[in-house]
Image (cartoon, grey):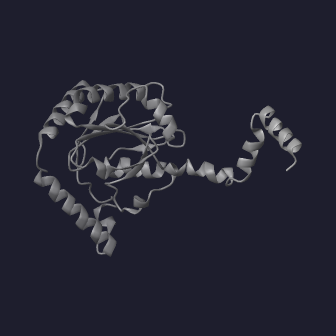
Amino acid sequence: MNRVLVFWLALLLVFSGGTILVVSWRYFQEDPVTVEKVGEEYLQLPTDSGQQWLQDFTLTRRTNEPFHSEQLQGQVWIASFFFASCPTVCRKQNEHVKLLHSDFSQEGVTFVGITCDPESDSPDVLQRYAKQFTDDDQQWLFLTGNLDYIRRIAGEKFQFPLAAKTHSERFAVVDKWGNVRGAYHWDKPEDWLEMRRQIKGLVAETEEPSEYIEKKQELRKSLQKLQDGTEDPAQSGGQSPASPATPQ
């Protein structure tokens, strides 16, 4: 190539701040819409959404990594629902989670906050929101995902009502084997004290209580009958199968 032409091309790149390179790079990339969708995968239904009665679930962490509830096996954990744009109640609620985290995280208790506004609460948004309360991304999780799926998690796992930007103000206490052992309103003093007592008791447990083992077995049998078509849901008044543990 002519040396004079090379010189002028180089000079043009310097004065254009690399614009030509950027345009060329974008030209050879995939459609920007496709790239954008990659960042919204957390809104899609996960592969385990076909469960007849959700007890284990898959969501997305604020670090943009997948989270499977099975990862909490062997840990006591506390679940709550919130949304980041809530200016009052959710902030007070997470301040109470912060108190519990300060007292119990060293004992292996994990805290799981699930947004009920996933359209707005992307992993990046949750990352910024979480920084207001904690630097711990291991034992205080902020999760997002598909709203319909999150609604099922709330209803089927915890027996909590949930809709977009609408959630229960109770904390669900879950034992080391995934059983929901209680549900407590964070702003009621008697609930707060009873929840703390229960957390301490669950941390000390070394064996799963037999009654919860039996409830799991009953649930599996009931779901199997439904799958086989040998049991009519209408026989139980049209209600879904009983959960392994019903919050009080």
Can you tell which quarter of the image residue 175 is in?
A: top left
- In percent of the image, x 25 and y 32: which residue is there? 105
Q: Quadrant of the C terminus?
A: top left
Figure label count: 0
- In depth, the one of 133 and 17 nearer the eye is 17
Answer above or below: position of 38 versus 230: above
Query: Residue at point 79% right, 38% down?
Result: 13
- The residue that appears at 42% across and 59% down in the rendered structure is 49
Residue 120 drawn at (x, y percent): 54, 39
Q: Is residue 96 above or below residue 122?
A: above
Q: Position of residue 142 (x, y in %)?
A: 40, 38
At 16% from the left and 57% from the top, the residue drawn is: 213
Residue nearest the viewer, comparing 140 with 201: 140
Question: Percent from the top left, x then y, of residue 194?
Answer: 18, 31
Task: Report whether 197 appears left or right of 21.
Answer: left
Find residue 100 and report its horizontal and vertical position in percent: 27, 29
The single residue placed furthest to the front in the displayed view is 3
